[in-house]
Image: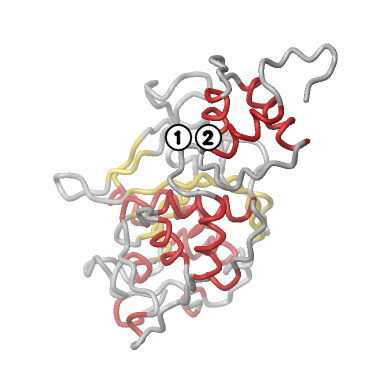
């Protein structure tokens, strides 16, 4: 059927046959002798196919399976692995996401395909993922927030990028805290911690510069052996890197149980509370800082 002013070079019957024998809209366009398979051409075909209520469930596009095949696979399978196998598709993360998304677009019922979680046979199997030292830089801020919150400090994150990472409310007022980490020792066995920053206006290749001591109040530093340092910015003013061994007076705890097998990774770590730790904990109203058992050393000895 055609209408006055219709510029189509094909009629409804030809479209029916092209859709029936093709596997994609572009293939249908080629079957109609349309060389230009632009988005506009495809939209036109789709509009007329919808008007004619043509069945396109067998279209696969660049896929090797059709909507109907997916419907059947989802209905017969009990897990997603079976769906992919039924479609002849390699079971990997990318293919699973693509097929799940297509099933959702088709409105298919997929609740029965949820994979059953294997039940652990021993406590060690509940969660046995190994520690990845390179992830310390991403977890350091969370460690700082937990350490400070457990000491009664309210911790907030800045909404906009700032020189500091955390805003911490203490009895002395709000402290601006910059969090740093160092995952491993240098070749000489020392902990060299980078405490500089790159200027915001330059690219990643720009050299680092010291923090303005008036823009932050404290450095919270976590090392790969679990050592925790809290150092005033005035002590580190003008520095871009430090050797942690030179600042043992500001060592306030140990989180080695989170970074290893549950025992301290540094057997020679000091077991006393630093003078600065006493002062810092003292402002939280603790009568005896050494009785505050949060940071665990080897043998369950706490600071």
Residue at numbered disc 2: 213
In percent of width and height, residue 145 lies at 55, 58
Residue drawn at point x = 74 percent, y = 37 percent? 50
Residue drawn at point x = 78 percent, y = 35 percent? 51
In percent of width and height, residue 39 lies at 62, 22
How many marks the image carries: the answer is: 2
Query: In the figure, residue 236 lies in which quadrant?
Result: top left
Indicate which disc residue 103 carries: none
Q: On the rendered image, what quadrant is the N terminus found in?
A: top right
Which is nearer the eye, 281 or 262?
262
What secondary structure is marked by label 1? loop
In percent of width and height, residue 274 lies at 41, 63
In percent of width and height, residue 131 lies at 32, 63
Residue drawn at point x = 67 percent, y = 15 percent? 9
Question: Is there a contact, CB below 8 Å, between mark 2 and mark 1?
Answer: yes
Against 168, residue 47 (above or below) is above
Horizontal relation, residue 209 to residue 153: left or right: left
Indicate which disc residue 237 carries: 1
Against 280, residue 216 (above or below) is above
* Label 2 CA crowd tier, 10 Å (few <14, some 14–19, many 20+): some
* Label 1 CA crowd tier, 10 Å (few <14, some 14–19, many 20+): few
Which is nearer the eye, 38 or 303?
38
How is this picture coloured? secondary structure
Mark 2 vs mark 1: which is more N-terminal? 2
What secondary structure is marked by label 2? loop
């Amino acid at each position: 059927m055609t209408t006055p002013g219709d510029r189509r070079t094909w009629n409804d019957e030809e479209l029916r046959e092209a859709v029936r024998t093709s596997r994609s809209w572009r293939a249908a366009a080629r079957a109609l002798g349309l060389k230009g398979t632009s988005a506009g051409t495809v939209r036109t075909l789709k509009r007329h196919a919808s008007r004619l209520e043509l069945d396109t469930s067998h279209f696969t596009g660049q896929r090797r399976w059709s909507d109907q095949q997916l419907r059947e696979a989802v209905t017969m399978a009990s897990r997603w692995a079976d769906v992919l196998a039924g479609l002849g598709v390699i079971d990997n993360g990318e293919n699973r996401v693509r097929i799940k998304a297509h099933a959702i677009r088709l409105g298919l019922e997929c609740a029965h395909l949820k994979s059953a979680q294997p039940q652990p046979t021993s406590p060690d199997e509940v969660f046995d993922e190994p520690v990845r030292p390179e992830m310390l830089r991403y977890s350091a801020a969370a460690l700082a927030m937990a350490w400070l919150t457990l000491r009664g400090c309210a911790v907030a994150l800045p909404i906009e990028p700032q020189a500091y990472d955390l805003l911490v409310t203490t009895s002395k007022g709000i402290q601006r805290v910059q969090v740093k980490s160092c995952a491993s020792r240098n070749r000489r066995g020392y902990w060299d911690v980078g405490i500089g920053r790159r200027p915001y206006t330059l690219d990643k290749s720009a050299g680092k510069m010291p923090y303005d001591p008036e823009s932050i109040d404290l450095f919270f530093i976590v090392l790969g052996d679990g050592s925790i340092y809290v150092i005033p910015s005035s002590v580190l003013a003008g520095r871009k890197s430090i050797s942690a061994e030179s600042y043992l007076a500001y060592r306030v705890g140990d989180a080695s149980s989170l970074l290893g097998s549950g025992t301290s990774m540094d057997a020679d770590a000091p077991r006393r509370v630093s003078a600065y730790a006493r002062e810092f904990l003292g402002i939280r109203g603790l009568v005896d800082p050494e009785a505050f058992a949060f940071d665990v050393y080897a043998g369950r000895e706490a600071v």
